[in-house]
Image (spheres, rainbow, N blue to C red):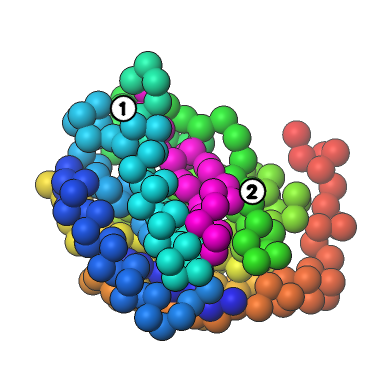
Amino acid sequence: MKIALIQLDIAFGNPEANYAAAERKIREAAADRPDCLILPELWTTGYDLTRLGEIADPEGRITKAFISALAKQYSINIVAGSVANRHPGGSVTNSMFIFNRQGELAGEYSKLHLFRLMDEHLYLQPGEAKGLFTLDGASCAGLICYDIRFPEWIRAHTVQGAEILFISAEWPLPRLSHWRALLISRAIENQCYVVACNRAGSDPANTFAGHSMIIDPWGEVVCEAAEGEEIVSGVIDWQKVREVRAQIPVFSDRRPDLYV
């Protein structure tokens, strides 16, 4: 499976500009014929949290129609990062939508862990469900940014068979070392692929780290972007997950009865 990571610079609080930029980048990435592509976190709005009531996507309808059409046109799986998703009644979640090659919704996940240092808890509602889905026969899970600091949440997906973790983020540059260390650790301890797409650029309060990357089940980096806007791609073989798990049987050697 060839995967392209679209490391966007996001226009703060400007969904129209961001849809246009994402479309250009998706078409550019599709020309290289990947099997799957992924976008960063909150790519339609950035962290313009105080205006989410105005600029969030009502029930994700705009994003779903937009991504579905592109997935079907190019026969490509799209992990559509995450967007501010406004629900009836006015609450907003940070939601990831996944579409298969036929343009069908293959999965959906809303960020479970809200990052208080960026005031997410003041403007967003947390998700309540896992992010498991299947693409091209591979068992996958979707996660968002701060989630990677919770290894027990990651393990909740991999014990249910997830072989590829798709992670969308807006991870700040001052904690770049944490980004790389946490992603590599999650790959090694779960013996799975990690596909992590961060954003580039800055907003009024933060500069972001970029360094989108794919990591294999041994913790080896398959590909990695720099800090700027970029499309980076790598090839993965999810059969390798099963080989690694058979070689070092971490999952069968677990003692969950003593982990509480």
Dot 2 corresponds to which residue? 132
Q: On the image, which quarter does residue 1 sit in?
A: bottom right
Quadrant of the rendered structure where residue 92 is?
top left
Label 1 sits on what residue type?
Answer: Tyr
Three-letter code for the amino acid on which mark 2 is drawn:
Leu
- Residue at 17% over, 43% down: 13
In magenta, the rendered stretch is 91-111
Indicate the secondary structure of the residue bearing disc 1. Answer: helix
Q: Secondary structure at mark 2?
A: strand
The answer to whether residue 185 is left or right of residue 91 is right
Q: Earlier in the sequence, mark 2 or mark 1?
A: 1
At label 1, counting other C-alpha atoms closer than 10 Å, the crowd grade (few under 14, some 14-19, many 20 or more) is some
Is residue 213 placed above or below 129 in the rendered structure?
Answer: below
Query: Which residue sits at x=37%, y=16%?
Result: 89
Look at mark 1 in the image and give the residue it sits on. 123
Outermost residue, top side = 89
* Residue shown at the point (25%, 26%) measured from the top left: 53
